[in-house]
Amino acid sequence: MIRFERTGSLLMTHSLPVIQPTSLAPEGRKPAWLKVRAPGGPNYMRLKSRLREWNLHSVCEEARCPNIGECWEDATATFMILGDVCTRNCGYCAIAHGTPVWEDREEPERLGRAVGELGLEYVVITSVNRDDLADGGAAHWAATVRAVRRHAPRCRVEVLIPDFQGRTASLETVLEARPDILNHNTETVERLYKVARHGGRYARALGLFRHARAVAPAVPTKSGLILGLGEERDELIATMRDLRGVGVSILTLGQYLRPSPQHLPVARYYHPDEFAELATVGRALGFTHVEAGPLVRSSYHAKRQADLAGSHLGPATHGGSGLAGPDTNGAGSHLISGHPPKVPAPRLSLQ
């Protein structure tokens, strides 16, 4: 039995199997729990056709998401703005990298109309990193959120943003558009950033959440981690603790799947029971919702995640900028950086 105990609170006890680490499967073979049905249903084909018609990108395709068949068959997609070429080259990511030459100023309005025509109630918007733009694409981001509000006023909007190279002004530009959920994927533990996240900084990711909480405390924050890059269990729990320390309320945990031989290898595959155990740890740390499983991705079941986390901020509440005043603790500086105050992890003991 694994006992979870938080300092200063009631004892929480959960009976769980002791999970032994799962070794890496032979090259080219994956565990049975990672098998998914090939996409191709009628709704999938319809949505694919409409995205082409509107000249819109989805991260579902660009990142080769394993859930594309399920989500598209349910007429749910994550839109990707600002092109399909990223200025960074992360070791785990399937999205093309290079020097973008694309900025479609009509895209926000076109995406807003698409959401309205599809009658979506919840939409996730993400983008590539655009380090070539002075604001990282923040103005384009804000215009897109506002266009969705105009064309689909009852639709909730989750934004899965890049780090804008730590520019707080860019973050505030997005927050002023009043998204319902602010999401930024931390992706991995601090030790692996130099290997996996070229151009990213662990402290910068934490600083983004800290600043968002300071200037827009009513907007819930969310982050995701991919498992299997070589992280240790204690590093993973420390990262979860750090995210709680900067106010992140929704956490997603999923298995890393190698897009090609040119990407980082899978260090190991996590068993579904391990994901269940980590979800329990996350809830003990104070996350309002933890979505954990081998095929979980940041935007997978995003509407359900928001509902279960108690996020019911309707678009009608989004009048004005909604931003708080300057952060007296220094979070309002030009660049966001630094580590959060430590939140005690639940103590684990085996019996």
Image: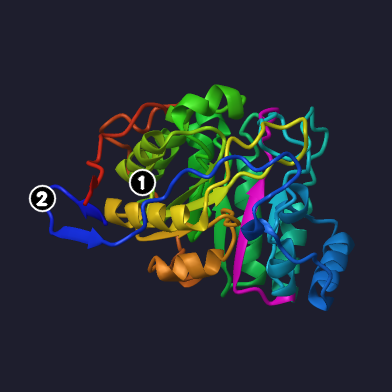
Place of residue 273 in the rendered image (x, y in percent of width and height, measured from the top left): 46, 57
Residue nearest the viewer, comparing 78 with 115: 78
- Against 42, residue 263 (above or below) is above
**Image-based side of 109 in relation to 317, left or right:** right
Place of residue 20 in the rendered image (x, y in percent of width and height, measured from the top left): 44, 46
**Front: mark 2 or 1:** 2
Residue nearest the viewer, comparing 83 with 63: 63
List the residue tagged with mark 2. Answer: 8
Is 123 inside the magenta-drawn segment? yes
Amino acid at dot 2 = Gly
Residue 178 visible somewhere in the drawing: no
Question: Which of disc 1 and disc 2 is earlier in sequence?
Answer: 2
- The structure residue drawn at horizontal position 30% and vertical position 37%, both measured from the top left corner, is 327
- The structure residue drawn at horizontal position 67% and vertical position 70%, both measured from the top left corner, is 151
**For mark 1, does the 10 Å Cα neighbourhood hold few (<14), some (14 to 19), or many (20 or more) residues?**
many
**Image-based side of 343 in relation to 157, left or right:** left
- The structure residue drawn at horizontal position 51% and vertical position 50%, both measured from the top left corner, is 183
**For mark 2, does the 10 Å Cα neighbourhood hold few (<14), some (14 to 19), or many (20 or more) residues?**
few
- Quadrant containing the N terminus is bottom left
- The structure residue drawn at horizontal position 58% and vertical position 72%, both measured from the top left corner, is 153
* Colour mapping used in the image: rainbow
Whole-Å distance between the Cαs marked 2 and 1? Answer: 25 Å
Q: Which mark is residue 122?
A: none
Residue nearest the viewer, comparing 332 with 276: 276
Mark 1 falls on what kind of element?
helix
Place of residue 129 in the rendered image (x, y in percent of width and height, measured from the top left): 66, 36
List the residue tagged with mark 1. Answer: 213
